[in-house]
Image (cartoon, coloured by chain):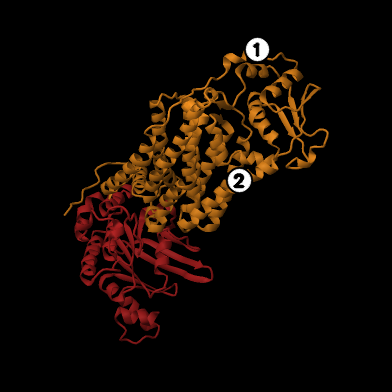
Chain colours: A orange, B red
Amino acid sequence: MPSPKRPSRKRRPFFWLLEKEWRELLVSRAWWALLLAIGPLVGFSFIGAMRTYAELSGLNGGAAGVGEAMAPLIGVWGPTFSACELAAIFLLPFVAIRVMAGDRQSGALKLELQHNMPAIVRIAAKMLALLAGWLIAMLAPLIALALWKSYGGTLYPPELAVLMAGHLLNAGLSIALAAAASSLTEHPSTAAIVTLGVTVGAWILDFVAAVQGGWWEKAAGYTPSAVVAQFQHGLVQLDVTLIALLLIAFGAGVAAIWVRLGVPVRRRVFESLGLTFAMALAIFTCSFTTPSWDASENRANSFPEPDQRALRQIHRPLKIVVHLAQEDPRRVDLERNALSKLRRAMPEVQVQYVALTSTGLFEQTSPNYGEIWFELAGKRITDRAVTAEAILESIYSVAGLTPPQDKDDETFRGHPLAIAPKGAGAIFYFVWPFTVLVSGLLVRRRFV
Amino acid sequence: MHRSMQILEVRGLSKRFGSIAALTDVGFEVRAGEVLGLIGPNGAGKSTLFECLGGVLPGDNGEIRAGGRAIHGRERSSLMFYVPDGVAPWPEQSVRWALDFTIGFFGGRADMLSQVVEELDLGRLLRQRIGTLSKGQRKRAMLAIGLLSPQPALLIDEPFEGLDLRQSREIAAALRGHATQGRTLFLSIHQIADAARFCDRFVLLSGGRVRGEGTVQELAALAQARGASKNSGGLEEVFLALT
């Protein structure tokens, strides 16, 4: 008969709770299922991306030379880590709901809440355990990184750090959402529906933003998919990062308000409304912060440095009036290739879109449709081109500046790698699932 | 601690679920070191009362008092620990871990661990997962969690539910031992015979209202004062007369 031993370690209650949450995660089948799935998911994305990258780099006599313009961040790591985005949207919330709602289902909450520990600390312990669990799941893309390095690929640590930070933020958003949903609802299945409902709602917001523009577009810039997209391009925008962190704090706060059992519903509703108001104010304020950093090796989010320096010489407000409808592909190109970079280089630039319809199909005959007006110090230049080079040329012209020379020295040459991903399939489709299964069995035996 | 000293008092506690009044103007006192039985038929509001006292459910009105003043939140949870009925907390964890966690997280009584395990015959269950325990085994594990908690007063919902006669008697003796050592026990019991054998005083609850409070003799006198026959001296007869 095993004899009981006194718990010898003197620890603060928070660390007991943290250990408990960690153990609950380790024995959670949902987490092991996530681990099991993420390996093949990452493997499929990595192998597919590598094959394409290798072909563009000249493998099998393909279009050799094209790959010289390709950056690993866009060609390999963006697609590979997109598997993590899928897992964060469709798998992680269920793990989080299992951890968050499990205590309520089992009745453990009735015991644990009799401790004086603040509810937000309890939620923080759960979120920390879940984030640790997510970091373990991120071993799969880290293995892909190691494989890439073993194939002779080059790594640019700043952009990879930003990419992983973005996926960690995205996981934090998923966990916070699941935490709030679990606390607000009585049953895990309802929490799952609420969580997926919010996710689908964010997609609808993206869709509406693409059609309506304006404030919708601004709001859609802070959805989880938009956050991840920016980090996947090596871009860190302070407003996006701060707002993502605020949303995580908001989810944790709502969860802390509603996880308490002995508090009247009316009081919890008022507290939630107060928190919502405070967060809305904070988010609104943060949305005006402009600093950003381009961590990508190929400066995908910036103009060449000589152009950046030249643009910084323009001190008067520049106004750009774009006569393109919201769904016009040229407008998308203009935003992606030029205006997003211009806003980073010249935070004072004012962009105004003019269109009568959302598609622009029936405005083609309008005399001004398709024009882009550049106005500076009472001077106006009109153009129709939407490439970065043409936009810069127009700005230099309206500002009376000489375009910088010798840009070629700054050009990113790319890192072609014409090698097939040998062994990756075996690792991600066989070794990873086998290791996860064996680890799961051993860990459950160890902890139970 | 002197047994007649009041450890807490409940005044005017009410709780409604929509149009249903689960508790109405409930009031009684709990004395230090006593075994107080909360008895009442199914649906009387016993568990609701315990959940309100344990801070698991918010009461609509009323207050809990200790030391001559109303207490809330931190003070209340440092005074009493509530052991709910019908729960299987941390089902994937072992009994041993649950007891260690109770001691570590709640600041429980590590020095009593061996004693409690022995009293509740948990030695052979320590490595077993809580989710795999039978109803009676789970009840014993829950009682151990309660007994290891640091609070001076223990509220246990249906402590003998799921136990056989022998186990009920052994556990009653163990609980009595803890009460003798100064622990205050407030037990919700729907089997009146069990309650009569074990408790010092009683709170009779029916239809969400307190119908009487006191020892068997005091309750019998109350029943007679309300017109019951003089033969109603046992707790069961008193209960029937008062509810």
User: A254 or A324: which is nearer to us?
Assistant: A324
Q: Quadrant of the N terminus of chain B?
A: bottom left
User: A36 or A329: which is nearer to us?
Assistant: A329
Residue B219 position by quadrant: bottom left
User: A246 or A159: which is nearer to us?
Assistant: A159
- Horizontally, residue B183 falls left or right of residue B28, namely left
Q: Chain of mark 1?
A: A
- Most extreme residue toward the left is A1
What is the secondary structure assignment of the residue under circle 2?
helix
Query: What whole-number distance in Å separates the C-alpha atoms at marks 1 and 2?
Result: 51 Å
Label of residue A160 in the image: none
User: A123 or A135: which is nearer to us?
Assistant: A135
Q: Position of residue B176 (x, y in %)?
A: 24, 64
Circle 2 packing at 10 Å, graded few (<14), some (14-19), many (20+), is few
* Labels 1 and 2 positioned on one and the same chain: yes
Q: Amino acid at mark 1?
A: Gln
- Horizontally, residue A304 falls left or right of residue A367, namely left
Residue B84 position by quadrant: bottom left
Q: Chain of mark 2?
A: A
Q: Which residue is mark 1?
A: A405
Q: Is residue B202 above or below residue B91?
A: below
Identified at 43% across, 62% down, the residue is B52
Mark 1 or 2: the one toward you: 1
Label of residue A277 in the image: 2
Q: Position of residue A318 (x, y in %)?
A: 73, 24
Q: Is residue A309 above or below residue A28?
A: above
